[in-house]
Amino acid sequence: MTARVLIADDDTVVRDVVRRYLERDGLEVRVAGDGAEALRVLGTERIDLAVLDVMMPGPDGLALCRSLRKGGDYSVSVILLTALGEEDDRIAGLEAGADDYLTKPFSPRELALRVRSVLRRAPSPAAALPLEISMGDLLVATAARTVYAAGRPVGLTNREFDLLIFFLTHPDTVFSREDLLQLVWRWEFGDLSTVTVHVKRLRSKLGEHHRLQTVWGRGYLWLGDDRRGDHAAE
């Protein structure tokens, strides 16, 4: 099934240029000129990924992303477009539940690559993963992309799920943020705070059931057995 992408931006030129690039990659594209139209599309059509402008007329991209995640919808991946370049603004977008962000002005080709990266989802081919992965109180159904902690469903974004799967399949190994950016995000370079925020969100959502440790000065490690040392969020 062809992936379907929503582009919501009040700039006609941005919508048209990005649409052409994504359609050239074989994706189905829907467009919206403001938040209200985007909300209608999200409510009536199957959308796999939404590219949302943070500064468009309300509800803006950040509000839409928060609304999706608050309602427990993690089936729609979100990339935020923002003209705000400050780190706090970028982190706010990630903490709202976005899978990625891009700061304006941007290259349409780069956005197309980011869209492909997010849609790729799992860092390993599904066939290479067992149908279920269990560790401690965690149970992950890999094909359905669902997670349970002590029997309780845990809603994860696509990127958070990718990160969890990577840690579960590579326990007892330290990975730097640079490593994770390349191995999970498939980026050769990028903002390392992206990794930091996703690790923080994964810890928060899994609560006492996570085994993520910060190895100061080196990176992160997922304990593969029942040894539970002190862990600290960066």
Image (spheres, rainbow, N blue to C red):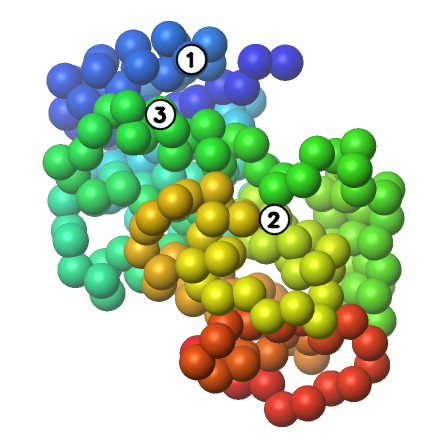
Q: Position of residue 85 (x, y in %)?
A: 15, 53
Inspect the image, locate mark 1, and give the three-letter code of the amino acid beneath it.
Answer: Asp
- Which badge, 2 or 3, comes first in the chain's sequence? 3
**Mark 1 sits on what residue?**
25
Can the viewer see residue 129?
Answer: yes
Q: Position of residue 53 (x, y in %)?
A: 25, 37
The answer to whether 229 appears left or right of 214 in the picture is right
**Mark 3 sits on what residue?**
112
Inspect the image, locate mark 2, and give the three-letter code of the amino acid beneath it.
Answer: Asp
The answer to whether 129 appears left or right of 20 in the picture is right
Pointers 2 and 3 in contact (CB under 8 A)?
no
- Which badge, 3 or 1, comes first in the chain's sequence? 1
> Where the N terminus falls, by quadrant?
top right
Q: Residue furthest bottom?
A: 230
Residue at the (79%, 32%) spot, across then down: 127
Q: Find numbered disc 1 in the image and state the secondary structure of the residue it sits on.
A: loop
Q: Find numbered disc 2 in the image and state the secondary structure of the residue it sits on.
A: helix
Q: CA distance from mark 3 to mark 1?
A: 8 Å
Judge whether 191 appears above or below 65 on screen. below
Q: Residue 162, which numbered label?
A: 2
Q: Position of residue 192 (x, y in %)?
A: 36, 60
Q: Find numbered disc 3 in the image and state the secondary structure of the residue it sits on.
A: helix
Judge whether 74 appears above or below 117 on screen. below
Judge the density around disc 2: few (<14), some (14-19), many (≥20) Cα neighbours within 10 Å.
many
Residue at the (57%, 44%) spot, across then down: 158
Q: CA distance from mark 2 to mark 3?
A: 20 Å
Quadrant housing residue 163: bottom right
Quadrant housing residue 38: top left
Inspect the image, locate mark 3, and give the three-letter code of the amino acid beneath it.
Answer: Ala
